[in-house]
Amino acid sequence: MCLGVPAKVISVTGEMASVVIGEIEYQANIALLEDIVPGDFIILHAGFGIEKVDPAEAEETMQLIRDIENGNILEENGTPSS
């Protein structure tokens, strides 16, 4: 299993990109990816961009992460998780 989070690309310089997750900016190595431009969303793992993702998919994943952080995840039966 690979753990990565969606990040929005804000600038690209060679094989490096400035990306933002929430309100925090990071540097990402994007050498593994092709045709990355500002505005794209990538999966960031350990400082490397590993996959380009659809903006809607990225937002859905970020919403799930926010829900987990806020304790808003429900079990399959509709009760809050413990």
Image: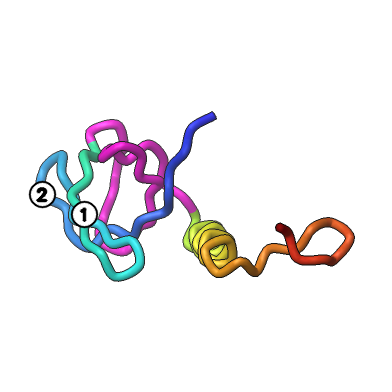
Relative to 22, is 76 on the left or the right? right
Find disc 2 in the rendering and name its residue. 13
* Residue at 42%, 53% in the rendered image: 6
Report the amino acid beneath label 2: Thr
Amino acid type of the residue that numbered disc 1 sits on in the rendered structure = Tyr
Viewer-side label of 2, 1 = 1
Q: Residue at x 36, y 39 (%)?
A: 45
Camera-side residue of 54 and 78: 78
Q: Element at badge 2?
A: strand
Pick whichever, 35 or 19, lies toward us. Answer: 19
Which image quadrant: the C terminus?
bottom right
Q: Residue furthest front?
A: 82
Write the start and end of the magenta stretch as one range.
31-53
Instruction: Tell me residue 56's x, y (percent).
Output: 54, 63
Q: Vertically, is 48 above or below 81?
A: above
What residue did someone put label 1 on? 26
Q: Is residue 66 above or below residue 26?
A: below
How many residues crowd mark 2 within 10 Å: few (<14), some (14–19), many (20+)? few
The picture places residue 59, in percent across and down from the top left corner, at 51, 65
